[in-house]
Image (cartoon, coloured by chain):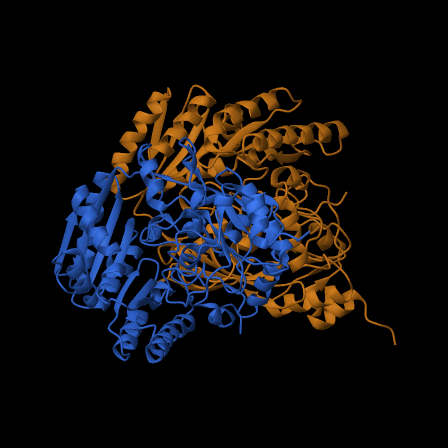
Chain colours: A orange, B blue
């Protein structure tokens, strides 16, 4: 009698329809929105629940195969791309919103739930989930990446929102990382450790998130400045003044131009802050008056506030579509976005440096960023078939990272390490990298969980 | 030639004045503010810097001795009490505020800096540090415990404020856990892991904290209710309404009585919420009007707002002195405070349960709590020389913990595990406890860092 193969074992334990080796499906799971080269997984599986994931892990162990998590493939750093022959675990069938705990301002979801799916449901309760990375990513992917985005200046990053995760470990055992209380000093902080671990310590099968009441009053605005420096200074001053700003996005001239082309807007082609404020009406009126003073000091020539829903949505849609505007404008090319974050005091200098790096390169490139956090991106399009362009894009990315690290920042503010930022881990973390590697070994001694990512570098 | 002893080695490597075996000093380091039995350390050392701490760790390794961290001894769960013959590391000589990075809203301190010392310095810059556990604890101790307190409902807990820690590991190596950027998706979240680790993974020698601008407008208030249920419901409704409440403290009838006796106040002896709001003037006026409606629905008979500094300080001093009021009122007895935290939806039931547990016990006891977080305490005084009282207090504590765990809460909201909550770790964390033990082993394979605390239980 022959021993069953990996695929047969998976099919037997799960079901035929949950396991596929179809090449089209496998190729879909070979890549994400990043610029990294695709690698096709051996097999793709679709678990329905934690038990399925546990069994996949046990079979993976039996066959000595690695597993790779897959949400919607919106990673910008190759977090889901296989590094060896192995199993891609696609969580799209685990997309139930399990429970809205209205009184506790909590929601429990499966990892395949997307951000817009969640907010559509929460709206019925007058609630919303605050983390907004732009892409309609899955909650599992956002948790694994420690995503953030436009609203984290006010509501925090992904790590701040997660109260409990059900995790399937390397050996198939199932644990919970937290509880439902708003705070705890019990045990070690597993919640925080798993958030941002990029599937290298375990797979998430249930996530309990904090949600917020939809604010009484929301005002969005656009403020236009003569220079990027002025725009950055205005953002920093606003933060220091304690104005409760909910979003604070910088878009530079080339990016405003791209936005106008793609989103059919006619914003002045100048450095612009896209802003949003949440609060009560009286409070916001006082804040906005103060805000006008602040931006005026920085030579702001035009500030417009939008209070109605449609105008506000249009503004944020235009901002969110910026990446797609670049992609749309360069057919056949691949997008690369840098993703460093620096201390606020270093932001103006860092963005000046970024502009110089782009100008000195062979690329057109836009700069956009969540400047309230000190996190900014260069967006550029390059030809993945040109060795010269690949090298030039990598060099640009490296210059930006080195600058950020030299001023006390980080190589990735929100996109994660994946395949793109491993080479900077030693420089960024120093001796801590050894500690991180020990943690990886403690959780995954056989190195089967999304191996050669994050703190591991395949030479 | 004789080999030097432990004490001789320490004295030789540090200096004579940094090492003592004086029995009075050692006894001071045998205990904290908790009810746990004192255990005297073999020797007390006073490091001046990270290098000293590193050398202490290396000597501890050489002599196979455990080390115990000591800040100001304000722990309520025996976090600093030795469990074996070993070295108490007193951080009081490491009490420098190293740098206020005003532009970045950051401050870098040594671990022995106290909360009030820090806030006195920050005030010069119009800034404040938000975590306020009541006691004038050291920042190192607060970080090791993941302390929180009255203002965490608005500004978050200790874990939310720490951007970087310099840590000396078991082998004496020195690492940094983070960077100066407001967010990062790089590497594993060591910051979060070390916060609340109670000295079991390493010793903190420098801590970089987020600070806030002093709010434009602060209003404090007292709202008096017919029943505890009403007070809790009012707190929950306020949170749900999105009113930006900065502190929300429940004090029950017996505790108001104790406060009046100790603090020379004449507050009505009824369940009371002590409140504080931060914002701009126009916004707060709208919020306070709304707040009045909310508390009226819960039968609030008296709500008073204080806008001037002196009245506000008096109110919070009275609240903070509650623990001392109990201690003062029971000379010779020891205080025990329970410290569970439950989901907000379970808070009213939990506090009713707590009241019943106290009424059924042999103790008078007050209930107070940070009800915006679902964290509440029973404060009671017991005679540590009476086996009956010890047993009864332990039973009461256990009943409160079991209740909290049964409704999805945690055994400790803010005081930490230390010696008092180890026995509940298995019930609270389940399979996760094995993962936590693996982390401990990875960081401290020889079990010399505050051993038999947190996730380790000495039978």
In front: B338, or A283?
A: B338
Q: Position of residue B222 (x, y in %)?
A: 18, 55
Question: Which of the 4 image quarters holds residue A457?
Answer: top right
Q: Nearer the viewer, residue B114 or A88?
A: B114
Residue lying furthest front: B1
Q: Residue, x 41% and y 25% (percent of image)?
A: A233
As rendered, which of B433 and A39 lies closer to the eye? B433
Q: Is residue B26 left or right of residue A240?
A: right
Q: Residue furthest right?
A: A1
Q: How many labels sit on residues?
A: 0
Residue B60 appears in the picture as rendered: yes
User: Is B91 on the left-hand or right-hand side of A168?
Assistant: left
The picture places residue A445, in percent across and down from the top left corner, at 71, 59
x and y percentages locating residue A251 in the rendered image: 48, 29
Q: Is residue B186 visible?
A: no
In the depicted view, which residue is nearer to us: B268 or B43? B43
Residue at image position (62%, 56%) is B63
Lateral position of residue A10 relative to residue B202, left or right: right
Where is residue B190? Give x, y as percent.
55, 49
């Amino acid at each position: 009698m022959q021993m069953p193969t990996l695929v047969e074992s998976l099919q037997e334990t799960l079901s035929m329809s949950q396991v596929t080796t179809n090449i089209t499906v496998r190729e879909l799971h070979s890549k994400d929105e990043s610029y990294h080269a695709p690698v096709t997984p051996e097999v793709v599986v679709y678990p329905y629940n934690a038990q399925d994931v546990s069994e996949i892990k046990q079979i993976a162990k039996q066959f000595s195969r690695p597993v790779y998590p897959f949400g919607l493939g919106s990673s910008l750093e190759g977090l889901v791309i296989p590094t060896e022959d192995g199993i891609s675990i696609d969580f799209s069938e685990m997309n139930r919103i399990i429970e809205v705990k209205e009184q506790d301002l909590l929601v429990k979801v499966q990892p395949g739930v997307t951000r817009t799916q969640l907010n559509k449901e929460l709206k019925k309760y007058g609630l919303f989930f605050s983390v907004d990375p732009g892409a309609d990513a899955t909650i599992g992917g956002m948790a694994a990446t420690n995503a953030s985005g436009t609203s984290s200046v006010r509501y925090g990053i992904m790590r701040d929102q997660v109260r409990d995760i059900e995790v399937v470990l390397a050996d198939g055992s199932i644990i919970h990382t937290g509880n439902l209380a708003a705070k705890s000093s019990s045990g070690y902080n597993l919640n925080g450790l798993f958030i941002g671990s990029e599937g290298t310590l375990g797979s998430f099968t249930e996530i309990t998130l904090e949600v917020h009441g939809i604010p009484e009053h929301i005002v969005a605005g656009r403020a236009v400045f003569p220079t990027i420096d002025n725009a950055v200074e205005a953002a920093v001053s606003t933060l220091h003044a304690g104005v409760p700003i909910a979003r604070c996005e910088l878009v530079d001239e080339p990016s405003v131009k791209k936005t106008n082309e793609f989103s059919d807007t006619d914003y002045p082609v100048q450095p612009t802050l896209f802003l949003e404020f949440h609060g009560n009406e009286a409070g916001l009126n006082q804040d906005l008056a103060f805000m006008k003073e602040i931006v005026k000091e920085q030579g702001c020539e035009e500030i417009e506030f939008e209070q109605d829903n449609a105008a506000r949505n249009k503004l944020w849609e235009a901002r969110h579509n910026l990446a797609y505007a670049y992609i749309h404008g360069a057919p056949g090319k691949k997008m690369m976005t840098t993703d460093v974050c620096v201390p606020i005091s270093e932001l103006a200098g860092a963005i000046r440096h970024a502009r110089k790096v782009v100008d000195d390169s062979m690329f057109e490139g836009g700069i956009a960023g969540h400047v309230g956090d000190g996190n900014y991106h260069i967006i550029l399009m390059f030809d993945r078939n040109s060795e010269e362009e690949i090298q030039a894009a990598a060099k640009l990315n490296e210059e930006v990272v080195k600058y950020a690290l030299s001023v006390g920042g980080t190589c990735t503010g929100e996109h994660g390490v994946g395949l793109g930022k491993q080479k900077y881990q030693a420089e960024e973390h120093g001796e801590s990298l050894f500690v991180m590697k020990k943690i990886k070994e403690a959780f995954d001694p056989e190195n089967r969980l999304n191996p050669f990512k994050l703190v591991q570098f395949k030479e």
